[in-house]
Image (cartoon, rainbow, N blue to C red):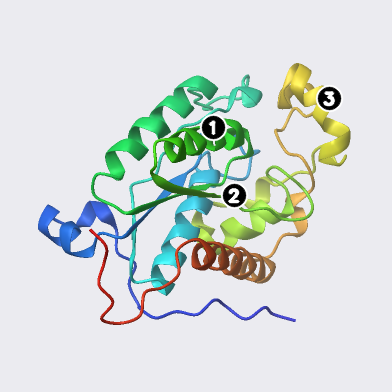
């Protein structure tokens, strides 16, 4: 049974980078910052997969919430666990945290609220620490990290999502099964030797049965969770309400 998509109130997503500064000044409220990575996702998915998921979620949030603008994505993060796979670019935990702290400080000069949407698990530590530091400075910053049951990396869920978000980037003819153990079983080995220590292909799971239909269902589920998170953190203002200065 297909899940119902999240509510939509506008047809086009508004990107911060497409606006002039006076346009931003008139629209300033919530800035959603997609945070991803540039790292291997097996032989069948692009290096941009985590970034694509973060951007896709932010876009869908902006379709539902007209007070949201979507920032250009942060496409680099802490991906050291994927070292040894060609194309992976990691700036490490310390640099990721520093980047987000400085970005948050700058963003809150314009925006009342800043939302980090982080779709790469390796960024969880630095994103959380950056948000905590910004909140300690009395800046209104929240974090959303999409989560799903099942295979954690380049497996069926992420492949299904990409079949919806960027189907032309998915090479299902190259999809292969990787290590099928649960993340709980794998974590000690991953901490010690990274992904390369458990799989030569970079896949954790089996993406071969992924479909766009299940990707649409998962994307709707994640979008609903994101919208609920933002509604709880920053309720929609009633029409005509005065924005605090």
**For the point 56% across and 64% down, which residue is it?**
164
Q: Looking at the rendering, which quadrant does residue 6 occupy?
A: bottom right
- Which residue carries the number 2 mark? 145
- In the image as oriented, which residue stretches furthest toward the left? 22
The earlier-in-sequence mark between 3 and 1 is: 1
Element marked by disc 2: loop
Q: Are marks 1 and 2 in contact (CB under 8 Å)?
A: no
Q: CA distance from mark 3 to mark 1?
A: 23 Å
Front residue of 99/89: it is 99
The earlier-in-sequence mark between 1 and 2 is: 1
- Which residue carries the number 3 mark? 188
The earlier-in-sequence mark between 3 and 2 is: 2
How many labels were placed on the picture? 3
In the rendered image, the quadrant that contains the C terminus is: bottom left
In the rendered image, the quadrant that contains the N terminus is: bottom right
Residue 17, x across and y down, in percent: 24, 51
In the image, 80: left or right of 37?
right
**For the point 58% across and 28% down, which residue is it?**
79
Front residue of 198/131: it is 131
């Amino acid at each position: 049974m297909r899940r119902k998509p999240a509510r939509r109130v506008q047809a086009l997503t508004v990107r911060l980078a497409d606006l002039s500064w006076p346009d931003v000044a008139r629209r300033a409220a919530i800035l959603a910052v997609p945070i991803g990575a540039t790292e291997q996702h097996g032989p069948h998915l692009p290096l941009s997969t985590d970034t694509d998921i973060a951007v896709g979620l932010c876009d869908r949030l902006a379709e539902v919430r007209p007070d949201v603008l979507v920032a250009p994505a942060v496409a680099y993060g802490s991906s050291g666990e994927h070292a040894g796979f060609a194309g992976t670019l990691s700036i490490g935990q310390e640099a990721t945290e520093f980047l987000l702290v400085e970005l948050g400080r700058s963003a809150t000069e314009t925006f009342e609220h800043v939302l980090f949407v982080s779709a790469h698990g390796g960024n969880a530590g630095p994103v959380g620490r950056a948000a905590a530091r910004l909140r300690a400075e009395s800046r209104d910053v929240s974090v959303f990290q999409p989560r799903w049951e099942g295979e954690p990396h380049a497996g069926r869920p992420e492949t299904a999502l990409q079949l919806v978000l960027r189907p032309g980037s998915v090479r299902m003819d190259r999809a292969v099964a990787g290590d099928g153990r649960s993340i709980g079983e794998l974590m000690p080995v991953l901490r010690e030797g990274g992904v390369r220590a458990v799989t030569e292909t970079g896949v954790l799971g089996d993406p071969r049965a992924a479909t766009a239909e299940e990707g649409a269902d998962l994307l709707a589920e994640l979008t609903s969770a994101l919208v609920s998170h933002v509604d709880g953190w920053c309720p929609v203002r009633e029409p005509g309400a005065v924005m605090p200065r």
